[in-house]
Amino acid sequence: MESWTPFILLGLGLLALWLYMRSGSSTRRPARSGQRRPAPSRSGPARLTAGQWEGRVLNQMRGDRARFERTLAAKRVKHPRASREELLEIIHEEYVLDNR
């Protein structure tokens, strides 16, 4: 029985290491597209108006008004209580994150 003691201790040590690595790795993973992203930062410089956000988003979409309206409608379904300005900011932030 005494000859098995080192193997049992080694197994317990490996199990503890595996559990430690598994618990720490979940906090370091980047967010998946299906997961909720943090809200855009509100502490930056002066807030942009809805018209300014619209100009930025349209510029990102290369002036494609139909694509702009479809994207805005999709975000409105996902965030029904958000203002137009907030929806446009969300679209802009997602576009910037996706196109790094």
Image (cartoon, helix red, strand yellow):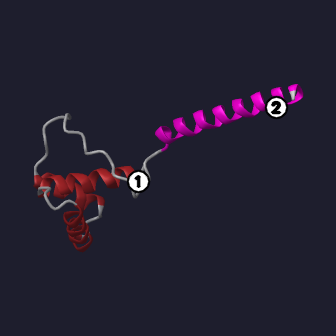
Front residue of 9 and 85: 9
What residue is disc 2 on? Answer: 7
Type of residue at label 2?
Answer: Phe
- Residue 7, compared with residue 31, is above or below; it is above
Front residue of 74 and 36: 36
Q: Is residue 20 magenta?
A: yes
What residue is disc 1 on? Answer: 99
Classify residue 9 as left or right of residue 44. right
Q: CA distance from mark 1 to mark 2?
A: 50 Å
Callout in the foreground (1, 2): 2
Q: Which quadrant of the figure has residue 69?
A: bottom left
The stretch of residues the image draws in magenta is 2-29
Q: Secondary structure at mark 2?
A: helix
Q: Is residue 77 magenta?
A: no
Image quarter of the N terminus: top right
Type of residue at label 1?
Answer: Asn
Residue at the (17%, 58%) spot, across then down: 54
As drawn, which residue projects farthest toward the right?
3
Classify residue 17 as left or right of residue 49. right
Q: Secondary structure at mark 1?
A: loop
As drawn, which residue projects farthest toward the front?
1
What percent of the width, then of the height, locates residue 74? 25, 68
Give the main secondary structure, helix, strand or loop, of the magenta stretch. helix
Residue at the (75%, 28%) spot, across then down: 9
What percent of the width, then of the height, locates residue 4? 85, 31
Q: Which quadrant of the figure has residue 7?
A: top right
Residue at the (49%, 38%) spot, across then down: 28
